[in-house]
């Protein structure tokens, strides 16, 4: 039985991870559960699974014991380093995923990474740890698709990674209407059911820029070897072009439980009757269109920060986190998200992207600065 | 340098194999060339490549020496068994591919198989040889796609193979018009440029039934684990569904040189600047539709013969070969192709499908009987 810790268990990915564990009780033992603010759900989960360890509010070890059932309260660091934990499912939304990811890798744990921000902020640091033997498995559907396409293919044969993007809920909307869209509209993703932060990032396509960064470091492919194609149906999750021109794609229904299960069981594939299956003979049309980057300033901003390197990606993540939060609270317009991020990045003085201290300092500076700039404008 | 023999060098696959050899003169040495009746092209090829061995008209060793340049005339059997030959590219159209395929495998050569009839007629025999260590590599685009999708995936994880079919030139044509279509119309394949026999087999979808049989034996997947989907654009060459529901597809422009090159270089992939590349960002729409088998009686006939087993598949291949020849000569209507094959199969008494003698006897009987039946009717 693999010992599992889920960080971010009350979010969308966390809940779906528990679905997989429920389907395969004989394969996994849930050792740790970490939530953030949804204490009632965390308590339900703890009551059902009775993990040894529970953590909430990130780093507060003083959990009221009546909320935690039979589990011992602990810190995230203690949880990811616990000897019974073999795989850490990292599903904390936003930049807070970085430290526990690094701690888990350092402790020799396998990290199943749903939280792409860790890779975005500290790509070179994590890539170096993986180069020295740490195990990081993708969970997000696009890098999971690439990973699956790369099975049995040597990395030197990669010519291009092609990430698919649904284009979000506003793909067909005239650009001049985007300034006035509401959070309610932006949260209606056409194909995926996900958490709020990532759904807004999907509407701005910031999410796709973050995936480009994640893929660049996860698969060690240069920027110019990664492309994005619009694919509104979200059936082809990504593609790899090999040096001979042959292309492989991975397809499936838009259901995160499939890539989650793949990471948890890797290198095995298992049948899970509770997952609906894609029927190729009834697919109908799959569309592939060039991305009009002019419509998606967050995508361009994200790639610029990525290529600038240093601590720009960390500042980007923090500024985006604040901007999306303000948009969800109705305090920022949809097209003000990129404006605010741009202003933070313009003011940023990059630190050393190889230094975790510098990355965390940039993240914290950008978070504060984004809040200040938004206050002035509101 | 890999020593190569090409059987069927003057046909479409043979000529494209020579294109690959021309592009990589430092990797391959052409040891043998075998043509059938196109002596002038065979001579040109022999003059350019100067192989040690040449064969034409299948088994006639007494080739006029002035046609053969510097090469020694030989039989197909001697060619495929020659010590300098490492890989045999089997591209003889129709049932004549069987014997030299078996001889090459017996002699320990790698066979890159474009001629699916060998596998159709003697699937269990060849599968047994492969089980004992013989090496057979697919060249046809659909099984090559499956083979590529299976890299790094254990065979036990296959849930389904999904072969794509363009539907041929008559996909949108009303069924009642099919009786009067001409060979000229049937030869206009919408996406692939191929030899005449296989182009007609693509119009009747007999070719797809033959591919189901080829895949069944090549990948050891039961009949119910193989499906066909209509995909008019011929960009997705086939797909594999794995036991967890994840699906992988291989994509490329409809150009046989890509799967040919993959087989010749396997397990390496190499860049070939002379091959045009698929641009995913400009794909537009890819359609996937259920196959209306009622429109394609040859497809149903083929699968019935396949499942009946024994020497039915050999009889089917022979009857189809004769029927297509008569259709191309204007002596049989398009919808009389399945009628003639059906009559031959109805009369066939199956032999032992594990015996090469029985297979060859069935092939020869069905060929003669198809001719007789056609004579009576014409």
Image (cartoon, coloured by chain):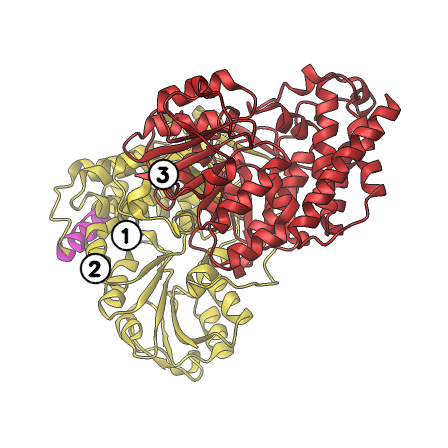
Chain colours: A yellow, B red
- Disc 3 designates what residue? B3
Residue B145 belongs to magenta span: no
**Residue under the point 27% across and 67% down:** A104
- The part of the image, by quadrant, that contains residue B180 is top right
Is residue B134 something one can see in this rendering?
Answer: yes
Q: Are marks 2 and 1 on the same chain?
A: yes
Q: Nearer the viewer, mark 3 or mark 1?
A: 3
Q: CA distance from mark 3 to mark 1?
A: 47 Å
Note whether B314 is above or below B68 in the view shown. Answer: below
Which residue is label 2 attached to?
Answer: A129
**Mark 3 or mark 2: which is in front?**
3
Magenta-drawn segment:
A356-368
Q: Chain of mark 2?
A: A
Q: CA distance from mark 3 to mark 2?
A: 44 Å
Q: Is residue A282 visible?
A: no
Magenta span: predominant SS is helix
Res. B261 image quadrant: top left
Q: Quadrant of residue A92?
A: bottom left
Q: Chain of mark 1?
A: A
Disc 3: which chain?
B
Q: Quadrant of the N terminus of chain A?
A: bottom left
The numbered mark at residue A119 is: 1
């Amino acid at each position: 039985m693999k010992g599992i810790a889920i960080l971010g268990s009350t979010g969308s990915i966390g809940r779906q991870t528990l679905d997989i564990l429920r389907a395969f009780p004989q394969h996994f033992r849930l050792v740790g559960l970490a939530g953030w603010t949804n204490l009632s759900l965390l308590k339900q989960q703890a009551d059902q699974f009775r993990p040894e360890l529970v953590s909430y509010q990130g780093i507060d070890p003083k959990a009221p014991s009546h909320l935690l059932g039979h589990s011992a309260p602990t810190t995230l660091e203690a949880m990811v380093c616990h000897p019974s934990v073999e795989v850490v499912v990292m599903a904390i939304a936003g930049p807070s995923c970085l430290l526990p990811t690094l701690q888990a890798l350092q402790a020799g744990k396998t990290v199943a990474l749903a939280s792409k921000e860790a890779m975005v902020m500290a790509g070179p640091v994590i890539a170096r740890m993986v180069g020295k033997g740490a195990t990081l498995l993708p969970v997000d559907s696009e890098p999971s698709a690439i990973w699956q396409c790369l099975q049995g293919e040597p990395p030197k044969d990669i010519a291009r990674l092609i990430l698919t993007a649904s284009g979000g809920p506003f793909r067909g909307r005239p650009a001049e209407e985007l300034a006035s869209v509401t959070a309610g509209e932006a949260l209606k993703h056409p194909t995926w059911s996900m958490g709020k932060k990532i759904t807004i990032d999907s509407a701005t396509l910031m999410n796709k820029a973050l995936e480009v960064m994640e893929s660049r470091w996860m698969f060690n492919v240069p920027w110019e070897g990664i492309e994005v194609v619009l694919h509104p149906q979200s059936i082809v999750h990504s593609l790899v072009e090999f040096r001979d021109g042959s292309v492989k794609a991975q397809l499936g229904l838009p259901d995160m439980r499939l890539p989650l299960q793949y990471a948890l069981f890797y290198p095995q594939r298992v049948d899970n009757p509770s997952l609906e299956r894609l029927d190729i003979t009834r697919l109908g049309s799959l569309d592939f269109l060039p991305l009009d980057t002019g419509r998606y300033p967050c995508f361009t901003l994200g790639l610029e920060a990525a290529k600038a390197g240093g601590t720009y990606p960390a500042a980007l993540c923090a500024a985006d986190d604040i901007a999306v939060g303000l948009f969800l609270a109705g305090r920022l317009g949809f097209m003000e998200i990129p404006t605010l991020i741009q202003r933070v990045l313009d003011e940023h003085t990059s630190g050393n992207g190889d230094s975790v201290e510098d990355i965390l300092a940039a993240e914290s500076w950008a978070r504060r600065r984004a809040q200040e700039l938004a206050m002035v404008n509101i």
